[in-house]
């Protein structure tokens, strides 16, 4: 798994490119584009984008070495104005200077692009350079002046820190971890290396979408993960038909499924409750506890709502300090059979 960092909203020229091929989809079946495509490239584009439209971005020849190995499913952070403005997932990728020049006509003194790639997904984001630098281990003042491709631990750190889940991560199961035929419809915990989450197919069928978690929510999850580590507990996540869990803890004290929300308002409490009840039957181990995590304590009636379904309420009281308001043990025991889907 690779993470590309692509400056894309700095100069007037890149802003124009953004408006032309990122802010809107391009109909690549139009004659002006199909004439520049090889038969193999047309086939690849249509396999990934059967409606004939896609968002496009690319790179100049000077970035060829960096772009080696970049492929379907890799993540792109589009930067500009001291922040990550959007996150995308690479679809088709190939070299075609003629197509690049038709998508992004170079200025008189400008350089042609020749690596071209589409985006399977593209979603707005607001991640500061300060936060991105911290995740990568760079100095706070680094401003990402040129194309970068992160690999290995650095790529993993970015995806983990900002809770970015590529859609291709949904489409691959580890054969050794596949559920047996007599098991309930559960998904394996996806705490393995990201390289195990890739999918390489000639014909690509999209089953899920790129997920980029709200920055406030992902920060809360990261802080709570450190809290768990301080307690000697570790957390992972798992994929299921309804989505991706925020935190999944299984150890000597049992199995706990945790869903975080960026605000303690009523609608967020309802969202957390709904997601927990949706995810719980798919927990790789039957969940002993469900917990909703908030930056502040919700209103008493909302805590009561969670408790009614046997769900604990956890909230932040100070930096790195959290307080749990547990549901009654009898209520939790009563609801557990429902959580397990039995």
Image (spheres, rainbow, N blue to C red):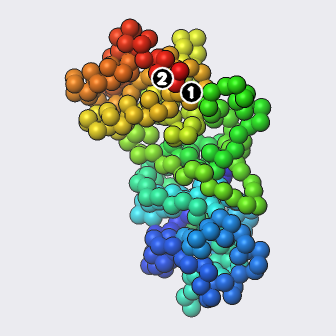
Image position, residue 68 (x, y; %): 74, 62
Instruction: Determine the residue located farthest toward the left in the rendered image.
Output: 300
What residue appears at the point 56 percent right and 82 percent down from the top-left corner?
104
Q: Which of 271 and 210 is in front in this view?
A: 271
| Residue 144 seen in the current view | no
Rendering quarter of residue 303: top left
Circle 1 — which element? loop
Which residue is most to the top?
330
- Residue 131 position, x and y percent, is 45, 47
Residue 124 versus residue 50 in the image, above or below: above
**Real-space Cα separation, disc 1 to disc 2, in angstroms:** 9 Å
Tell me which label, 1 or 2, sits earlier in the chain: 1
Q: In this view, does 341 lie above or below 151?
A: above
What is the x, y in percent for residue 324? 36, 18
Instruction: Please give the label number shown on residue 283.
Output: 1
- Few, some or many residues within 10 Å of mark 1 (<14, 14–19, 20+): many
Q: Which marked residue is nearer to the observer: mark 1 or mark 2?
A: 2
Tell me whether circle 1 and circle 2 mark residues in contact (CB < 8 Å): yes
The residue beneath circle 2 is 339
Q: Which residue is drawn at 47% across and 17% down?
A: 336
Residue ID at (66%, 70%): 46
Q: Is mark 2 on a helix, strand or loop?
A: helix
Q: Decide if residue 214 is on the left or right side of residue 183.
A: left
Looking at the image, which is closer to me, 68 or 340?
340
Vertical comparison of 127 with 160: above or below: below
Within-10-Å neighbours for mark 2: few <14, some 14–19, many 20+:
many
> Residue at image x 58%, y 11%?
252
- Where is residue 340 drawn, in percent x and y? 52, 22
Residue 36 in sight in this render: yes
């Amino acid at each position: 798994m690779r993470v590309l960092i692509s400056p894309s909203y700095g100069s007037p020229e890149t802003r124009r490119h953004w408006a032309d091929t990122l802010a809107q989809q391009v109909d690549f079946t139009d004659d002006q584009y199909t004439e520049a495509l090889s038969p193999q490239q047309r086939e690849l584009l249509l396999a990934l984008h059967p409606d004939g439209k896609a968002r496009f971005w690319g790179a100049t020849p000077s970035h060829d070495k960096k772009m080696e190995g970049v492929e379907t499913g890799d993540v792109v952070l589009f930067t500009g104005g001291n922040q990550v403005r959007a996150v995308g997932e690479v679809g088709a990728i190939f070299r075609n200077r003629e197509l690049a020049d038709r998508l992004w006509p170079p200025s008189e003194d400008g350089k042609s692009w020749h690596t071209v790639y589409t985006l399977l997904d593209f979603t707005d984001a607001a991640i500061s350079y300060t936060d991105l630098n911290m995740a990568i281990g760079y100095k706070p003042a680094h401003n990402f002046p040129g194309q970068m491709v992160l690999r290995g631990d650095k790529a993993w750190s970015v995806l983990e820190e900002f809770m970015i889940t590529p859609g291709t991560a949904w489409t691959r199961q580890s054969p050794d971890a596949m559920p047996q035929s007599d098991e309930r419809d559960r998904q394996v915990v996806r705490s393995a290396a990201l390289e195990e989450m890739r999918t390489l197919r000639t014909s690509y069928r999209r089953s899920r979408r790129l997920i980029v978690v709200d920055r406030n929510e992902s920060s809360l999850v990261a802080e709570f993960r450190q809290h768990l580590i301080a307690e000697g507990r570790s957390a992972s996540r798992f994929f299921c038909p309804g989505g991706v869990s925020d935190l999944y803890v299984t150890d000597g004290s049992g199995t706990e499924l945790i869903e975080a929300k960026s605000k303690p308002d009523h609608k967020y409490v309802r969202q957390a409750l709904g997601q927990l009840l949706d995810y719980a039957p798919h927990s790789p181990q039957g969940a002993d506890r469900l917990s909703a995590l908030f930056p502040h304590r919700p209103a008493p009636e909302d805590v009561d709502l969670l408790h009614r379904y046997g769900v604990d309420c956890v909230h932040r009281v100070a930096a790195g300090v959290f307080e749990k308001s547990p549901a009654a043990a009898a209520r939790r025991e009563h609801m557990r059979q429902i959580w397990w889907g039995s």
